[in-house]
Amino acid sequence: MWMSSFGLQSFVNLASAPLIEQAMRQEGKYPIRDHMELWKEHRDRQSLPYGLFIKQGEQWYHLRQALNQRLLKPAEAALYTDAFNEVIDDFITRLDQVQAESASRDLVPDMAHLFYHFALEAICYILFEKRIGCLEPSIPKDTSTFIRSVGLMFKNSVYLTFLPKWTRPLLPFWRRYLNSWDVIFSFGKKLINQKVKEVEAQLQAAGPDGVQVSGYLYFLLTKELLSHQEAISTFPELLLAGVDTTSNTLTWALYHLSKNPEIQEALHKEVVGVVPFGKVPQHKDFAHMPLLKAVIKETLRLYPVVPTNSRIMVEKETEIDGFIFPKNTQFVFCHYVVSRDPSVFSEPESFQPHRWLRKNGTNNHKFQHPFGSVPFGYGVRACLGRRIAELEMQLLLSRLIQQYEVVPASGMGEVKSMARIVLTPNKKVSLRFLQRQC
Ligand code: HEM
């Protein structure tokens, strides 16, 4: 535990599982992660209502209650299985096309790039029931502009966090940052307006009882859990949250499986034992795939996509290890450090999914500290998309491991992680996909 400061702000950093546990267990009814000043400035300028990441207090709570429905529980996430599988079919077609373009006809030169397109296509389909062409050989112009703007928004926000405000009119970052957000919101707004029109048309044609409630946005709008304006402010943020997170995790998982052929072989056996070649995995199958789940847990332990998280304790004083911190203290949780702490995980730098499996009838990971690896956060403000993210990653990884043997491209070497708001690989992850015989 140590203090640090940045400008006028000071932070209490916690880099131990028991200390993080003490802080998290004291969070109040309406936890605050961060005041999100930079995001707020854009919304205020455009007179947009705040979305889930920015809203605080009771307002956050009400929005979160509405959004939790049809997303938070595993059984609710399972409703999206067919939609994910439809996108996965197209991903595999795209994967084969990319391989065919390589000299060896089995190489994918940049896995993270391909998974990014998959994750965006998948989350758009889940949220809006709309396919946006990310997996087509030539991506539609507004989709590629959206993708570029997301990258620019994140990149420029890093500069803006460090530079003083007076530099904004002089340097290009502020203008680029605001423009990128505008593109992100107009992309989201277009999709939402289309959906609203569809809902209205159905209501007119069939009346409230005739409306088929299927996709997430459709469900929230027709059940009147979310207004049109709330959707416009919230859904673009959900899109952002659902892309880099799953795409980077999938990249790391395949990277380690390619480097550990015995683990990959064991996983292949597990998958085809439950879902033979030619069959498509379903939600219920994962109850019989403990190694698959352990691979994802181990990947997120080594690479928590959100490497540090935080809480501002506004409701009362917080006591950590006998120290009393006043109201409004901001605690930073150093998850990356903790999940590689040798006092919590033995041989922490190595990829060992088996550490999460039951051994001799005991649940091995029960001996590990419960706050050693919390990649989706904790409590009422934990990740909203956890269950769909898990389902999406399970469906895609199992299908890939069922059909291909994945090996590293020659000369790829070791890939390290790099913190760019989320944790990303420091260079391209190039993999070869060898088709397995059925
Ligand atoms: C590997 C996948 C993912 C990981 C590791 C991840 C991780 C996280 C973490 C650590 C937080 C902060 C939680 C806290 O403060 O306690 C968070 C928040 C959030 N995540 Fe995820 N996430 C993932 C995927 C997704 C997806 C697919 C969505 C899509 C809907 C999503 C939507 C959100 C939202 C909306 C929040 C903010 C919740 C709030 O403030 O109430 N996440 N996520």
Image (spheres, grey):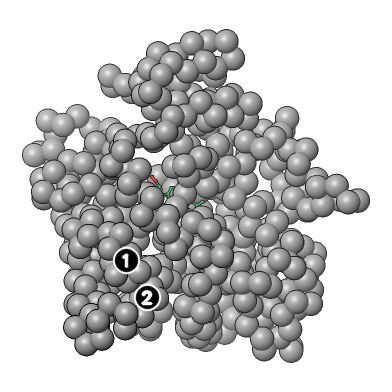
The picture places residue 419, in percent across and down from the top left corner, at 45, 43
Which residue has dot 2 on it? 213
Q: Are marks 2 and 1 in contact (CB under 8 Å)?
A: yes
The amino acid at mark 2 is Val
The picture places residue 111, in percent across and down from the top left corner, at 51, 67
Q: Is residue 337 above or below residue 426?
A: above
Q: Secondary structure at mark 2?
A: loop
| Image quarter (top left, top right, bottom left or bottom right) of the C terminus | bottom right
* Residue 68 appears in the figure: yes
**Badge count:** 2
Residue 47 placement, left or right of 67: left
Residue at 71%, 51% (x, y): give it: 351
* Residue 125 appears in the figure: no
The amino acid at mark 1 is Lys
The residues tagged by marks 2 and 1 sit, at their Cα atoms, a distance apart of 9 Å
Residue at 38%, 50% (x, y): give it: 65
The picture places residue 299, in percent across and down from the top left corner, at 62, 53
Residue 240 placement, left or right of 172: right
Q: Earlier in the sequence, mark 2 or mark 1?
A: 2
Queried on whether the Cβ of the residue with tag 1 lies below 8 angstroms from ligand 1, the answer reads: no
Q: Which mark is residue 223?
A: 1
Disc 1 crowd, CA 10 A, few/some/many (<14, 14-19, 20+)? few
Q: Which mark is residue 51?
A: none
Residue 313 figure quarter: top left
Residue 147 placement, left or right of 434: left
Q: Secondary structure at mark 1?
A: loop
